[in-house]
Image: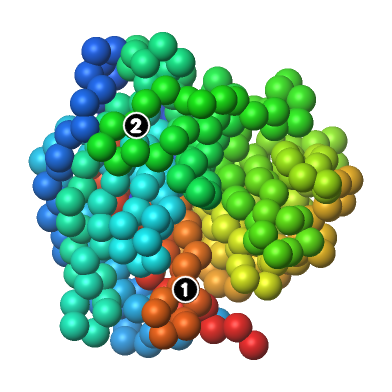
């Protein structure tokens, strides 16, 4: 498990996280059918290990799941979005797979399992599967009106697909992401694609944010890639944290999920709110840290985030982790209420 502080395990995790080494299955160019996958779960009832508190700044922990499967394809979950709030979801794995499923809930509304999970290999413009992982390193996802927008790194691109859980087909189109390709680092590309609020100042535009592709001043490249505010901006890099996902809040702010790693401190996770008014062409966007967690908490390599509204009106934040197909890491689903002042 990633919570071990043994030197070998930390070194192994460091290699997975920062050198892109993952124990992933090889892609098969002729295997594109939807595959059902049985998921076993272990409930997570405490976010701070061994302590019963539920409030962490503005976040209230609801519950979580540690997910395992005998399927060799399960894992490497990089991004997800709910298709139905808190229920049906779509996601991408950085090994070149789509995944779909449903979060099951107990009588109190807490996550209790994952149902109807299935995976399908991504295909190219000709409808064939990719032969090499670097060609299909999917890291980010946004959904709107039946269309999934996916960000890929290594072979940097932003592509759109019609959402069909029964059979995901070839991309519809590729989008201009504005940022010069030579400014995008090979393994530090688009970790965030977020759809701005339709009634907000960005008029529903797609926003892309890189993981750690830095400009000359050390800030993170990002862009508004459509709409009247179209243009490149940057996000202020704060400390050693890299950006792994993000989603817009109802008030127009952008909630970013961030991750860091060091041999001394291990893996850390952070949630930062970027002021919506600072997201504009030519600007340096910034905002406060809302929560930070280290290996004393139930975290792993946290890579996916979504924001949704519960039936009772509560603003919810859900997170998933990428286990890099490593026996030392875990696939987690975590759920919080975000209390806004």
Residue 168: image tag = 2
Q: Is residue 29 left or right of residue 159?
A: left
Q: Is residue 37 above or below residue 112?
A: above
Q: Is residue 137 above or below residue 286?
A: above
Circle 2 — which element? Answer: loop
Q: Is residue 119 left or right of residue 286?
A: left
Residue 199 visible in the shown view:
yes
Quarter of the picture containing the C terminus is: bottom right
Q: Quickly name the residue at label 1.
A: 309
Residue nearest the viewer, comparing 75 with 224? 224
Circle 1 — which element? Answer: strand
Q: Residues within 10 Å of mark 2 (few under 14, many from 20)?
A: some
Q: Is residue 277 left or right of residue 325?
A: right
Residue 13 visible in the shown view:
no
Tell me residue 139's x, y (percent).
48, 38
Q: Are marks 2 and 1 in contact (CB under 8 Å)?
A: no
Q: Residue at x 76, y 31 (%)?
A: 178
Q: CA gap, disc 2 to disc 1?
A: 27 Å
Q: Is residue 232 left or right of residue 35?
A: right
Q: Residue at x 41, y 50 (%)?
A: 80
Q: Residue at x 68, y 72 (%)?
A: 251
Total numbered labels placed on residues in the image: 2
Q: Is residue 102 above or below residue 209?
A: below
Tell me residue 231's x, y (percent).
82, 40
Instruction: Farthest residue to the front: give it.
Output: 145
Q: Residues within 10 Å of mark 1 (few under 14, many from 20)?
A: some
Q: Residue at x 34, y 53 (%)?
A: 89
Residue nearest the viewer, comparing 217 with 310? 310
Instruction: Farthest residue to the right: give it.
Output: 282
Sequence-earlier tag: 2 or 1 = 2
Residue nearest the viewer, comparing 150 with 227? 227
């Amino acid at each position: 498990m990633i919570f071990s502080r043994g030197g070998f395990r930390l070194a192994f995790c460091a290699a997975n996280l920062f050198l892109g080494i993952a124990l992933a299955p090889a892609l098969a160019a002729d295997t594109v059918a939807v595959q059902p996958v049985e998921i076993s779960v272990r409930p997570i009832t405490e976010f701070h290990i061994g302590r019963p508190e539920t409030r962490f700044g503005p976040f209230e922990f609801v519950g979580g799941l540690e997910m395992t499967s005998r399927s060799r394809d399960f894992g490497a979950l990089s991004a997800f979005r709910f298709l139905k709030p808190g229920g049906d979801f779509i996601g991408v794995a950085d090994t070149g797979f789509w995944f779909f499923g449903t979060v099951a809930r107990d009588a109190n509304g807490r996550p209790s399992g994952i149902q109807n999970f299935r995976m399908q290999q991504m295909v190219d413009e000709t409808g064939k599967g990719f032969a090499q992982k670097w060609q299909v390193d999917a890291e980010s996802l946004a959904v709107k009106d039946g269309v999934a927008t996916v960000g890929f790194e290594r072979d940097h691109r932003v592509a759109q697909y019609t959402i069909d859980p029964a059979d995901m087909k070839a991309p519809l189109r590729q989008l201009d992401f504005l940022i010069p390709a030579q400014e995008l680092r090979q393994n530090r590309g688009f970790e965030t694609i977020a759809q701005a609020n339709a009634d907000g100042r960005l008029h529903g535009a797609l926003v892309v944010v890189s993981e750690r592709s830095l400009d000359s001043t050390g800030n993170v490249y990002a862009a508004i890639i459509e709409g009247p505010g179209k243009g490149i901006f940057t996000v202020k890099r704060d400390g050693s944290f890299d950006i792994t996902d993000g989603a817009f809040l109802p008030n127009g702010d952008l909630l970013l999920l961030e991750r860091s790693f060091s041999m001394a401190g291990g893996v850390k996770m952070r949630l930062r709110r970027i002021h919506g008014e600072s997201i504009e062409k030519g600007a340096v966007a910034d905002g406060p840290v809302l929560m930070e967690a280290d290996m004393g908490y139930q975290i792993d390599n946290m890579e996916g985030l979504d924001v949704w509204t519960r039936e009772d009106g509560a603003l919810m934040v859900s997170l998933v982790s990428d286990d890099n197909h490593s026996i030392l890491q875990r696939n987690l689903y975590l759920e919080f209420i975000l209390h806004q002042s």
